[in-house]
Image (cartoon, rainbow, N blue to C red):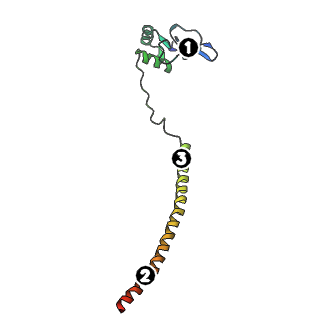
Amino acid sequence: MAVSIRLARGGAKKRPYYRIVVADARSPRDGAFIEKIGAYNPLLAKDDPKRVVLDTDRAKHWLSVGAQPTDRVARFLDAAGVQERAARSNPKKAEPGEKAKERAEERAAKLAAAEEAANAPAEEPAAEPAAEEVTEVAAEAPAEEAAAEESTEA
């Protein structure tokens, strides 16, 4: 018989209250159980000592017999120091999916194109004043040459 340590829901609608029970894995969530070893009230503040009440001696006994805790109960047992919960490592969890990556690439390409379009008109006006400077310099050059000729003639 597979035995599990799990939560059995009680309380009213929208007002959950859970019993931490040892039950046959095949029995319904709120159905028959072997033993009640604690309670969990999610409506209380996280630092409230009455939020999770657990009989650690009985929990240790059932774990030694082979009862398997659910994920949530394993967290409670770890917090109580009864059983250490192995840390999960999923490095790909935060990595976006393929479609999200494609959308990000498209967005980056659009931004790059927009920046190029914004920079291109800004460069053209900068090129026009340079052309005006060349014409001004060209106009000044004949005047300087004329002044140089006058000084050589004198």
First-in-chain label (2 vs 1): 1
Q: Nearer the viewer, residue 45 or 101?
A: 45
How many other residues sit within 10 Å of disc 3, few (<14), some (14-19) or many (≥20)?
few
x and y percentages locating residue 31 in the rendered image:
59, 11
x and y percentages locating residue 151 in the rendered image:
36, 88
For the residue labelled by badge 2, is the local secondary structure a helix, a strand or a loop? helix
x and y percentages locating residue 144 in the rendered image:
41, 83
Q: Nearer the viewer, residue 109 or 37?
A: 109
For the residue labelled by badge 3, is the local secondary structure a helix, a strand or a loop? helix
Between circles 2 and 1, the one closer to the viewer is 2
> The residue under label 1 is which amino acid type?
Tyr
> The residue under label 3 is which amino acid type?
Ala
How many other residues sit within 10 Å of disc 1, few (<14), some (14-19) or many (≥20)?
some
How many other residues sit within 10 Å of disc 2, few (<14), some (14-19) or many (≥20)?
few
From what the image shows, is residue 55 above or below residue 99? above
Please report the residue visible at 42 percent of the width from the left and 15 percent of the height from the top.
80
Please report the residue visible at 52 percent of the width from the left and 50 percent of the height from the top.
108
Q: Which residue is mark 2?
A: 141
First-in-chain label (3 vs 2): 3
Residue 18: give its label. Answer: 1
Give the CA distance from mark 3 to mark 2: 55 Å
